[in-house]
Amino acid sequence: MTTLDVLMRLAHTIDSRKVANGGNPDASYVARLLHKGPDAFLKKIGEEATETVMAAKDLDHNISAADCAGLQGKLVGEVADLWFHSMIALSHYGLSPADVVAELERREGTSGIEEKALRKAVQREASND
């Protein structure tokens, strides 16, 4: 089983929680977030991103190997929360983890500096139209 398989199963579960698909906001956290709309799940993404940064910073300042192991677990947990809430946003906008993986595959082997320069050039061209 691949990582994409796990993500796609989770995406399917998230999709099934949409109110249009029978999800119940009173019984499901995901259904509740989707029912409340983008402000609710985008706020959660912001919170989880901040918590991810804080967990990483804690790792930068760990005192002992024992502390480091626990802090690594905390970072992994926060990234999982960030990915999960990001997947709710993807579902809301009709996208899936496969779309993100395809974009990462498209970028593979491309310098990050080149990629950023290309995006800026495309944005400049679009604004000149």
Image (cartoon, grey):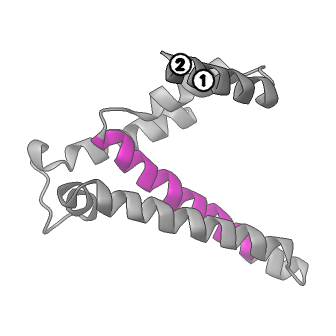
Q: Nearer the viewer, residue 54 or 8?
A: 54
In the picture provided, is 110 more to the left or to the right than 129?
right
User: Amino acid under label 1?
Assistant: Arg
Task: Point out the stretch of residues depicted in magenta.
Answer: 71-92
Q: Magenta segment, principal secondary structure?
A: helix
Give the labeled residue for mark 1: 124
Secondary structure category for the residue under label 2: helix
Q: Does residue 3 lie above or below 55 as drawn? A: above
> Would residue 79 be counted in the magenta stretch?
yes
> Would residue 47 be counted in the magenta stretch?
no
Which residue corresponds to the image point at 73% horizontal and 25% vertical from the top-left? 117
Residue 33 seen in the figure? yes
Q: Position of residue 41 (x, y in %)?
A: 35, 59
Mark 1, Cα crowd under 10 Å, few <14 / some 14-19 / many 20+, is few
Q: Position of residue 114 (x, y in %)?
A: 78, 23
Which residue corresponds to the image point at 21% horizontal and 50% vertical from the top-left? 17
Q: Residue furthest front?
A: 128
Q: Position of residue 107 (x, y in %)?
A: 68, 22
| Badge 1 vs badge 2, beta-carbon distance below 8 Å | yes
User: Amino acid under label 2?
Assistant: Asn
Find residue 123 and report its image quarter. Answer: top right
Q: Residue furthest right?
A: 64
* Numbered label attached to residue 11: none
Give the labeled residue for mark 2: 128
Which residue corresponds to the image point at 65% horizontal and 71% vertical from the top-left? 74
Residue 69 seen in the figure? no
What separation in Å lies between label 1 and label 2 (alpha carbons)?
A: 6 Å
Give the mark toward the camera: 1 or 2. Answer: 2
Q: Nearer the viewer, residue 79 or 38?
A: 38
Q: Does residue 122 lie above or below 80 as drawn? A: above
In the picture provided, is 72 more to the left or to the right than 44?
right
Which residue corresponds to the image point at 15% horizontal and 63% vertical from the top-left? 25
